[in-house]
Amino acid sequence: MVLLGFAGFDAAEVNRQLCEAYDIRSAFDHGELSTVQGRARAQAAEAIVLEYARLALLKHLEVDRWPEDKDRFLNDLDDDSKRRELRKELSGGLWDLAGPSLGGGDG
């Protein structure tokens, strides 16, 4: 969620939407989405999750240190004191070319 926050998304809203998508997945797993309303709810969440996945994948492909130091990179994402530096490292690039279509901003 922090990574998508760098793209201009509200991290709390990303978290809420991904939790909603997980709840939908769980309901589907347990056979609770057999209604028209349930399927409509799943279809509404699909576009959001696909866009978040697309943007996260684009940025991960761009991060030079990802392959050799994945754990440190992920820890840095969670460390408030390192986020400003990390934001500079992750700004621009592919996100400038394929920016978020769900809203967001300039990262």
Image (tube, helix red, strand yellow):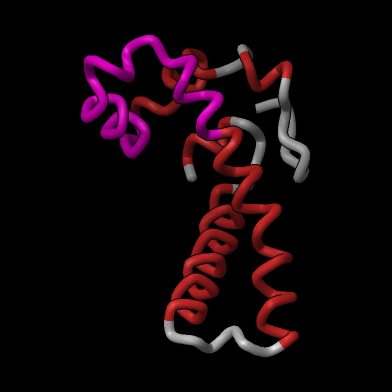
Asked if residue 39 is positioned above or below residue 43 in the image, the reply reads: below
Residue at the image point whose x is 61% and y is 57% from the top = 13
Asked if residue 84 is positioned above or below residue 41 in the image, the reply reads: above
75 falls in the magenta region: yes
Q: Position of residue 2 (x, y in %)?
A: 47, 40
Residue 63 or 41: which is nearer the viewer? 41
Q: Is residue 76 left or right of residue 11?
A: left
Q: Is residue 3 left or right of residue 41?
A: left
Q: How many marks?
A: 0
Residue at the image point whose x is 71% and y is 17% from the top = 96
Asked if residue 34 is positioned above or below residue 61 in the image, the reply reads: below
Q: Quadrant of the C terminus?
A: top right
Q: Position of residue 18 (x, y in %)?
A: 53, 59
Q: What's the magenta bit mostly, secondary-structure-wise? A: helix
Q: Which residues are magenta?
A: 56-81
Q: Quadrant of residue 100?
A: top right
Q: Is residue 76 left or right of residue 41?
A: left
Q: Quadrant of residue 9?
A: top right
Residue 84 or 44: which is nearer the viewer? 44
Q: Position of residue 35 (x, y in %)?
A: 68, 89
Residue at the image point whose x is 61% and y is 12% from the top = 93
Asked if residue 63 is positioned above or below residue 60 in the image, the reply reads: above
Q: Position of residue 27 (x, y in %)?
A: 49, 81
